[in-house]
Amino acid sequence: MKNLHPDPPYEKPIPHPKNRFMALTSNCTDMPTLFVDTHAPLDILTDAASYRIRAVTQVLENLSMRGSVECDSMILSDFALLCAIPLRDGCDVLDVIGRRLRARPSE
């Protein structure tokens, strides 16, 4: 039988502008597991942000077309979180795109 070893103590990464991977704001703990590759091509980053924002937009548009929506506050809270996570991810990716574009030398 193998001896099991516990994981080493977690060291929180120190944000640095030159780090390639940026933790998403929507990580649910202080130990981030979801990241954006800040060196990815701009068109790939744009597609990733657009996909997330459009997905939430589609859900909200479908909801707005219903005559009436009745639900309790717990369901509404869960729904808001469901929409907020991909929106925040999309905004994080847009932030990366903005920083990359601003860092380009002016032509």
Image (cartoon, helix red, strand yellow):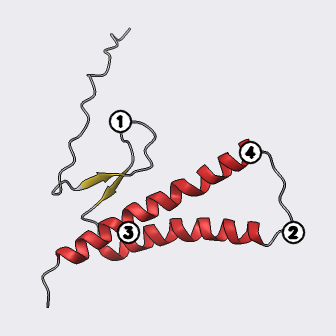
Element type where label 2 sits in the image: loop
The residue at which mark 3 appears reads as: 94
User: For the point 31% across and 74% down, which residue is it?
Assistant: 42
> In what element is the residue under mark 1?
loop
Residue at coordinates 59% horizontally, 50% vertically from top-left? 81
Q: Amino acid at mark 1?
A: Met
Q: Which residue is mark 2?
A: 67
Give the structural element (helix, strand or loop) at label 3. helix
Marks 4 and 3 sit apart, C-alpha to C-alpha, by 31 Å
Residue under pointer 4? 73
Query: Which structural element holds mark 4?
Result: helix
Residue 65 at what x, y percent from top left?
79, 73
Q: Amino acid at mark 4?
A: Ser
Please give left or right for residue 105 compared with residue 43 in the image.
left
CB atoms of marks 4 and 3 within 8 Å: no
Say which residue appears at 39% left-offset and 48% top-offset: 34
Give the x, y percent position of residue 27: 43, 44
At a point 17% along the width and 79% down the height, the residue shown is: 104
Q: Is residue 15 left or right of residue 36?
A: left
Residues at marks 1 and 3, CA–CA distance in whole angstroms: 22 Å
